Amino acid sequence: MKRFLIMISLACTLLACADSGQWSEITYADPTIFAEDGKYYMTGTRNREPLGFGILESTDLIHWSVPNGDTLQLILAKGQGSFGEKGFWAPQYFKDNGTYYYTYTANEQTCLASAESVFGPFVQKEVKPIDASRKNIDSFIFKDDDGKTYLYNPQSDSYFTGTAETKTTALCSKAEAPYFEAACVSETNNTYTFN
């Protein structure tokens, strides 16, 4: 089911039916959808004030609304326990052992924040990027069947492994793949796909 939702978010279900019955475009770039308890939660790049990430909720992947009933509900906001001054891009949800994790880009750096609720607020224990040694964007977290968690960072020379709670360690380096954005990793019958 998770892989299905990832593919949906990458294919971009970008239309939603408003209460009036008229179709309107959802203006998130880099959308990601997280499913839990029969509901779907979408977030993505907004690129406007207030900076940070909003959330939409759906029960059918067609009709979307702001969960708190307002026009915007931020789940991670600039200056509120999170790294970054600009360029809040390409988020991804991940849940592990009851904690929600949120990887995102800010200032062209990959960051990781956590919360006790899918609605946030997502904050960092230490307000800083994961690896400030170089610019890196559009990370993706993948947890394998063996329990290992991997952070894929497409603009870096390395892919990292570790737990969401701890600093990551290098898994491999000098990747020979060309430059790309919006990493996604999935596994089916012991075959791993990295797109």
Image (spheres, rainbow, N blue to C red):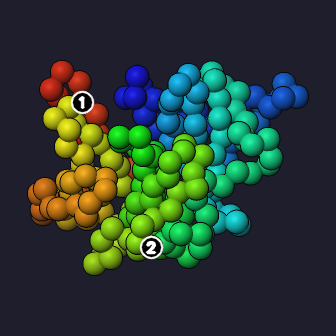
Identify the residue at image location x=50%, y=52%.
Answer: 115
Most foreground residue, 47 or 117: 117
Q: Secondary structure at mark 2?
A: loop
**Residue 72 seen from this side:** yes
Locate the N terminus and report the quarter of the image it occupies: top left
Q: Position of residue 152 (x, y in %)?
A: 28, 52
Residue bearing mark 1: 187
- Pointer 1: residues within 10 angstroms few (<14), some, or many (20+)? some
Foreground residue, 114 or 168? 114
Measured as percent of width and height from the top left, residue 108 is found at 43, 70
Residue 43 shows in the view: no
- Please state which of the two labelled residues, at mark 1 or mark 2, is closer to the viewer: 2
* Residue pictured at 35% horizontal, 49% vertical: 140
Viewer-closest of 167 and 16: 167
**Left or right: 98 as drawn, with respect to 133:** right
The residue singled out by tag 2 in the image is: 127
Q: Residues within 10 Å of mark 2 (few under 14, many from 20)?
A: some
Which mark sits nearer the N-terminus, 1 or 2?
A: 2
In this rendering, the answer to whether 194 lies above or below 170 is above
Query: Which of the 4 image quadrants contains residue 177?
Result: bottom left
- What's the residue at 54%, 43% (across, down)? 118
Residue 47: give its label.
Answer: none
Amino acid at pointer 2 = Val
Give the x, y percent position of residue 25.
Answer: 71, 39
Q: Name the residue located 74 percent from the left edge and 51 percent from the top edge.
A: 72
Residue 63 point in image, percent of width and height = 70, 27
Amino acid type, residue under disc 1 in the picture: Glu
Rounded to the nearest angstrom, the CA distance separating label 1 from label 2 is: 32 Å
Tell me if residue 165 comes above or below residue 124 in the rendering. Answer: above
